[in-house]
Image: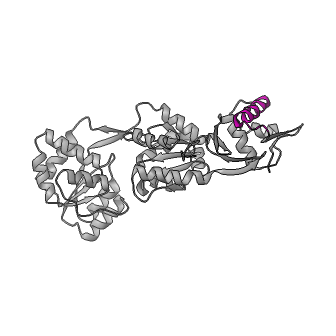
Amino acid sequence: MREELAGFTIGVTADRRRDELAALLERRGARVVLAPALRIVPLSDDTELREATRACLEQPPDILMANTGIGMRGWLEAAEGWGLAEPLRSVLASSYVVARGPKARGAIRAAGLHDQWSPASESCDEVVDHLRRRGVAGQVIAMQLHGERQPECTLALEAAGATVIEVPVYRWAPPTDPAPLHRLIDLIAGRLVDAVTFTSAPAAEALLRAAGDRTDAVVSAFRGDVLASCVGAVTAEPLLRRGVPVSAPGRARLGALVRTIVDELPRRTVTFKAGGHLLTLRGHAAVIDGELRPLAPAPMAVLRALAQSPGRVLSRTALLRTLPRGADEHAVEMAVARLRAGLRAPRVVQTIVKRGYRLQVD
């Protein structure tokens, strides 16, 4: 199979670059569920940003913390509209510029400024540690915020003797339509997706918050069958705090994130021989003798249950527990019939009279 992710279903929680990420995954054969957990909202009232900009002009910062590319570009564009772009660039050009990541660095350089240092981890904590070691007592720090205030960073720098000017450029808000996010949460809790991608820590927090009374089921799924794939270590923090294992690339890029998923998901599949055929189970499909066979959720649930104990007979009652709520024993028979038809290999699932079903293992 040339499409490495064929047969897998992947949730995308990003908003701003969701189409780009979805295209990268679909190009590799994945089925994508788009469910933005948050959206970026420019400040409707520029009063705070204008006041922060004027504060930087009145107290030229000794240090600039550039946290995001979109935030730095937005700040400079707003300053342009107020006729303050050149004075702002002039004072920032004299600052010690820390770019938290490559996107912030790109925005800094595009503005004709020069960055002096970046953290390897792209972590705000590492930036604060670096600045405290360097010494910030009596200095003014302009901290471009990324969506939310960072009181722990601000307080740590103020405790070290700095004056911090917080620069708010945009904020996070719930998605305009929350239905796709709640549908994704249902799919995660039901283990009907294979992976979920996260490109920001606030998005991971937002999904867990939106889960409400299903949070334990979602966390349990992430600890078992559903891969939590994060673009970087900073994004992974809310999940790691809850004991969720995550996969993340060494470099925080969408392409690297997709390559990590391509490497990871196929390794999590189950492969076995049954009825003279070689089967590999993927998220919503079985690969039988190299051919992808998409299956509906009920037949796939039956196949997964049988594959957990190859050769062992499972009763209709046992299989019923794997099906969606409200199903009856007749639904089990229908699911088995649809499974055989979908696999196009009737000998794989064997009926044991008055007992149930099993895989005819080789």
Which residue is rendered at x = 67% and y = 51% of the image? Answer: 270
Q: Quadrant of residue 59?
A: bottom left
Relative image position of residue 139 (x, y in whole percent): 18, 63
Judge from the rendering whether residue 245 lies leftward or rightward of residue 275; answer left or right.
left
Across the whole image, how many numbered discs are drawn on residues?
A: 0
Relative image position of residue 256 (x, y in whole percent): 43, 53
Say which of 339 and 38 sits in front: 339
Colour mapping:
one colour
Relative image position of residue 225 (x, y in whole percent): 61, 49
Q: Is residue 59 visible?
A: no
Which residue is rendered at x = 55% and y = 50% of the image? Answer: 227
Residue 65, magenta (yes or no): no
Say which of 111 and 90 sits in front: 111
Relative image position of residue 243 (x, y in whole percent): 55, 56
Judge from the rendering whether residue 260 lies leftward or rightward of residue 226; answer left or right.
left
* Magenta segment: 328-346
Q: Quadrant of residue 334?
A: top right
Say which of 242 and 70 sits in front: 70
Q: Is residue 299 visible?
A: yes
Which residue is rendered at x = 44% and y = 40% of the image? Answer: 23
Judge from the rendering whether residue 201 lies leftward or rightward of residue 311; answer left or right.
left
Q: Please determine whether, in this image, residue 218 is positioned above or below residue 324.
A: below
Q: Main structural element of the magenta stretch: helix, strand or loop?
A: helix
Q: Quadrant of residue 63?
A: bottom left
Q: Residue furthest right?
A: 354
Residue 338, magenta (yes or no): yes
Judge from the rendering whether residue 208 lies leftward or rightward of residue 149; answer left or right.
right
Say which of 69 and 215 sits in front: 69
